[in-house]
Image (cartoon, rainbow, N blue to C red):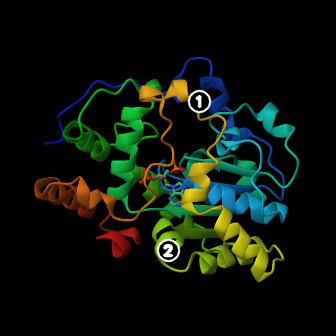
Amino acid sequence: LLEVDGTYRATSRSVPGHENEIRSIPTWQARDDDVLICSYPKSGTHWIWEVVSMLMRSKAERVPGVKESAMLELIPQSRFDNLPSPRVLNTHLQYGQVPKDMLNRRCKILYMIRNPKDISVSFFNHHTKLLDYEFTGSWEQYLPRFLRGDVDCGSWFDFTLSWENFIVQIPDYPILAVYFEDMKNSNPLREIERIAAFLEVPCDVMFLERVAQLCNFNEMKRDKEPLEDAEDWRDGKPDMYRKGVVGDWKNWFTVGQNDLFDKVFSERMKNSQTNVRFS
Ligand code: A3P
């Protein structure tokens, strides 16, 4: 069942020449006030990046530039050196690959989590629509690939277990887990307030309400980012902000696919905390 395939090409993350930059990440110099967002792709990285970036600047306005311009594995360190403090950085790397200096300095980390079933659907659409991937497979072909971890940035299971281990091994490290589902379904203001408290930024309710409003899905989709070049996307239609909902997987999974997913999930995550939330 895990062997069905579609043709596939890795993205710019594995383009030769960028390899050395990526290899040098563990030795990067950090700053004490750096904040790092860690997430598996399609977990809501753009969303939380926007929230955190507004909170850290104490300004409820969108920054010119995009979260890609702050991504450890895409940008050479020299370009980060020019960014003013406090820097809001992000990564899809596992914890063993992030800069050691950042961990030694105990830079704050936000760990964004989303139901992996929704992630698989979102990532399939991403692979299909972003031309860089040259992915021509169907959803039926993609899901086994996702479960195997044979996709951009590797396995969701490995990523999640890596960060969970980090939390267990260093229980007093300043890291905050944020669930996409809580940001979306519960009171978003309460989640943003929780993030602000973690970041120790002073803010009043009006400011938080404005941040919540500007970071709501429709607003973010409308103001979509300049780097979302139309020519990078199938049919010239950027689709980074696709649906922004919880539970879209139910529109995609067959009963058999759901059973397969649950089986792999319970095997891989049997000792995991995430199991409690999504099984
Ligand atoms: P869907 O494809 O399910 O719509 P990332 O930023 O990590 O690539 O994650 C992208 C996913 O987050 C997409 O999911 C996107 O629509 C969703 N998203 C982005 N901004 C959002 C927001 N403000 N509110 C809700 N979902 C958002």
On-image quarter of the N terminus: top left
Q: Is residue 253 left or right of residue 118?
A: left
Q: Looking at the image, can residue 106 be seen?
A: no
74, 69: nearer the viewer: 69
In this rendering, the label closer to the viewer, 1 or 2: 1
Looking at the picture, which amino acid does disc 1 mark? Asp
Q: Is residue 141 left or right of residue 207?
A: left
Rendering coords of residue 3 (x, y %): 17, 35
103, 85: nearer the viewer: 85
Looking at the picture, which amino acid does disc 2 mark? Asp
Tell me the residue that label 2 is attached to: 182
Tell me the residue that label 1 is attached to: 229
Precedes in sequence: disc 1 or disc 2: 2
Q: Is residue 151 above or below residue 232?
A: below
Q: Is residue 198 above or below residue 117?
A: below
State the SS at label 1: loop
Q: Residues within 10 Å of mark 2 (few under 14, many from 20)?
A: some
Q: For the residue with label 1, is its CB less than 8 Å from the closest atom of ligand 1?
A: no
- Quarter of image, res 267: bottom left
Q: Residue at x 63, y 78 (%)?
A: 189
274, 215: nearer the viewer: 215
Rendering coords of residue 191 (x, y %): 60, 76
Q: Is residue 78 above or below residue 106?
A: above
- Quarter of image, res 142: top left
Q: Looking at the image, can residue 176 be seen?
A: yes
- Quarter of image, res 6: top left
Rendering coords of residue 69 (x, y %): 70, 39
